[in-house]
Image: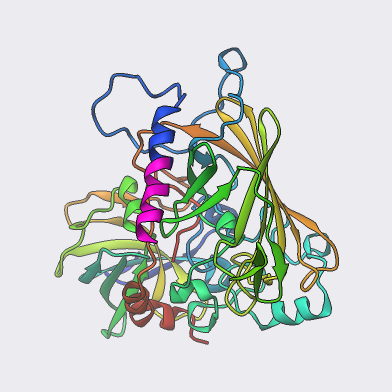
């Protein structure tokens, strides 16, 4: 990792398979095998069905701030993984691991996060699932 | 009409409570049970025989998830052996469907799945989505409550005949009855532990899909389900579709093992909210699926 910026690393597809696939949409149609580690400032956290959405401002190496939006599964599914309605507050500094969208827009599937106080929630690639229903969510 | 409906439901509920034979019923707990699904298989020595003529209880799908990749026995993975036996019309319909799941899935912004508009899934698609069912059983009928969108259906077990299937409805006692989301179901115990259920009169192909991958189904389908109670805690649920409009021959879509759960569990329920979906698409779905 350099600066406070994006560190990109590619993991084996096999690792990704240990994470329950989302969702109302097929993961294969939207997400590739790339995971990104993003450090940034929380802008919003939507605790809602069918998916929770985390918006983070991430400053790039060029100094420009890019707004990333990442989705999790539904609250009832991610609660056992440590996610809560108040896990993120605007202004919090967080590090998140996301599975990047195939279209390379600043979107991804939120796999895990390290909160401002150091608490880790979610499941990073290769750690396997914990709790939750797994499988697929209703839209 | 409302009174009749309430009477039927009250009767079913009372019967279910009266005839509850669950091994969980008297465990002394007064709290809210942990809504654990997928109990471990019962050890051979602890198995109890299936009760006669009863499928009542809370049942969870033990392994197959919610068939997100298509009907359980034939996932829509592009392999020829899993391709349903489409008629030309059936194949044409399939190609017109833009699904969110399956090997040819599209992104959220491009789908035309009626589910995403919060339309009812209809039968048989409820059998292929988010399986978790609560079954109440009375003297004349069996009620199945589906977890997704809190939908329910009635299976009549009082030896009434299956309605005659018409074009756009069914005939009952010489009268026309309109088609409906769950169709018209009658069940018959073919042995002590197996209930066979026939259903006709479901919704047409422009309103419903068979599964999450956009496979079509028409209102000419004749659905045959069997609920086979293998022992007290295990039930096998299978489904065969005979839809000459869409398929050239009958085919079996699922054979799923369900496991009995603690009946006091307040299971997770899911509602489809158009507002939530609109918010999601605006904030995320449209962007993530953009080309």
Query: In the image, is residue B258 above or below residue A39?
Result: above
For residue B288, what is the image quadrant? bottom left
Q: Which residues are magenta?
A: B1-11
The kind of secondary structure the magenta stretch mainly shows is helix
Q: Is residue A73 left or right of residue B199?
A: left
Q: Nearer the viewer, residue B118 or B2?
A: B2
Q: Is residue A36 visible?
A: yes
Quadrant of image for the N terminus of chain B: bottom left
For residue B13, what is the image quadrant? top left
Query: In the image, is residue B261 above or below residue A43?
Result: above
Q: Nearer the viewer, residue A80 or B34?
A: B34
Q: Is residue B61 left or right of residue B243?
A: left
Q: Is residue B65 visible?
A: no
Residue at the image point whose x is 51% and y is 32% from the top: B260
The location of residue B238, given as percent across then percent down, is 69, 46
Query: In the image, is residue B235 above or below residue B125?
Result: above
Q: Is residue B10 magenta?
A: yes
Residue at the image point whose x is 35% and y is 64% from the top: A1
């Amino acid at each position: 990792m350099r600066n406070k910026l994006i560190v990109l690393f590619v993991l084996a597809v096999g690792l990704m398979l240990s994470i329950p696939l989302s969702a109302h949409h097929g993961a294969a149609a939207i997400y590739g095998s790339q995971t990104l580690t993003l450090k940034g400032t929380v802008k919003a956290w939507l605790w809602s069905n069918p998916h929770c959405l985390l918006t983070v401002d991430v400053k790039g190496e060029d100094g420009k701030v890019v707004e990333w939006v990442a989705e999790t599964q539904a609250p009832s599914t991610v609660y056992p993984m440590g996610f809560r309605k108040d896990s993120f507050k605007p202004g919090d500094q967080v590090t998140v691991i996301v599975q990047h969208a195939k279209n390379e827009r600043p979107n991804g599937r939120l796999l895990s996060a390290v909160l401002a106080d150091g608490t880790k929630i979610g499941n990073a690639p290769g750690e396997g699932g914990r709790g939750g229903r797994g499988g697929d969510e209703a839209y | 009409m409302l009174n009749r409906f309430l009477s039927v439901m009250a009767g079913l509920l009372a019967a279910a409570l009266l005839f509850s034979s669950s091994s969980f019923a008297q465990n002394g707990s007064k709290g809210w049970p942990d809504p654990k699904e997928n109990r471990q298989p019962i050890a051979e020595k602890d198995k109890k025989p299936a009760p006669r003529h009863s499928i009542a209880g809370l049942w969870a799908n033990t392994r197959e998830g919610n068939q997100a990749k298509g009907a359980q026995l034939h996932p829509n993975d592009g392999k020829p052996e899993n391709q349903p036996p489409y008629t030309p019309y059936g194949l044409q319909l399939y190609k017109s469907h833009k699904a969110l799941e399956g090997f040819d899935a599209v992104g959220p912004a491009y789908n035309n799945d009626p589910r995403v508009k919060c339309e009812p899934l209809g039968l048989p698609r409820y059998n292929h989505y988010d399986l978790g069912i609560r079954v109440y059983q009375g003297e004349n009928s069996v009620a199945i409550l589906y977890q997704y969108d809190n939908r329910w259906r009635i299976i009549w077990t009082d030896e009434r005949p299956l309605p005659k299937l018409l074009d756009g409805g069914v005939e009952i006692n010489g009268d026309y009855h309109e088609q409906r989301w769950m169709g018209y179901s009658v069940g018959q115990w073919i042995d002590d532990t197996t209930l066979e259920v026939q259903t006709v009169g479901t919704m047409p192909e422009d309103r419903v899909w068979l599964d999450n991958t956009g496979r079509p189904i028409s209102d000419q389908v004749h659905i045959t389900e069997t609920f086979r109670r293998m022992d007290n805690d295990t039930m096998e649920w299978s489904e065969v579709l005979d839809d000459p409009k869409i398929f050239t021959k009958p085919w079996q879509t699922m054979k799923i093992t369900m496991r009995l759960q603690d009946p006091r569990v307040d299971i997770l329920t899911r509602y489809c909210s158009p507002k939530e979906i609109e918010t999601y698409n605006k904030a995320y779905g449209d962007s993530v699926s953009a080309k």
